[in-house]
Amino acid sequence: MSRCTEITEESIRTLVDSFYERVRKDQELGPIFDHAIGSTDEAWEPHLQVMYGFWSSVMLSSGRYRGNPLRKHLSLPPFDTALFDRWLMLFAETARELHNPELADLYIAKSAQIAGSLRRMMEAERQTDNRLEATVQLRSFVEPRSRTPD
């Protein structure tokens, strides 16, 4: 297979399809994505369409993506944010396999920026949630409880 030498809608589609095929087979990421998206090709189609638009917007400035990645990721059941490293590794492997080194490096740099931002914001959001939960728990110790007559 010859490597892509320019970024096009078609090359983005190939990258997204190849990458998520790897994700679905991955022992660490596959179950998380299956839980969030589903395990059938039909269930995956809407997600892939969103990802085509997302990467088109990132790499071609097409403006096709209109979502909020942080909100989407925060709505997922909690997962270990260290899995972003696994995601990045699979993405880099796919980008290098399909693109010449210069284009692969562009994709890899963008994916690292995006994953890093998502990871930091998700961790900050979880810390805020944990602080709120701790405050509620602390208040339960210090606030007077209503007493029922004996």
Image (cartoon, grey):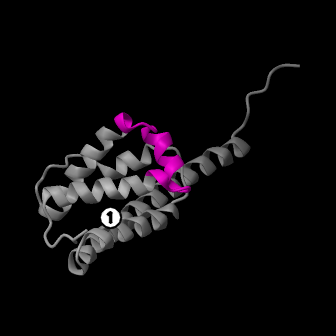
In the rendered structure, does residue 66 fall within the stretch colored magenta?
A: no
Predominant secondary structure, magenta span = helix
Numbered disc 1: secondary structure: helix
**Residue 96 horizontal/vertical position (percent):** 31, 73
In the rendered structure, does residue 31 fall within the stretch colored magenta?
A: yes
**Residue 125 horizontal/vertical position (percent):** 46, 54
Which residue is outermost to the top?
Answer: 149
* 96 relative position to 103: left or right: right
Q: Which residue is mark 1?
A: 114
* 113 relative position to 39: left or right: left
* 23 relative position to 98: left or right: right
The quarter of the image holding the C terminus is top right
Which amino acid type is marked by label 1? Ile
In-front residue for pair 39/37: 39
Q: Quadrant of residue 92?
A: bottom left
Which residue is painted at 56% across and 54% down in the image? 131
Tell me: residue 84, above or below residue 142.
below
| Magenta-drawn segment | 24-43
Which residue is painted at 63% across and 51% down in the image? 134
* 26 relative position to 68: left or right: right
**Residue 109 horizontal/vertical position (percent):** 29, 74
**Residue 100 horizontal/vertical position (percent):** 22, 77
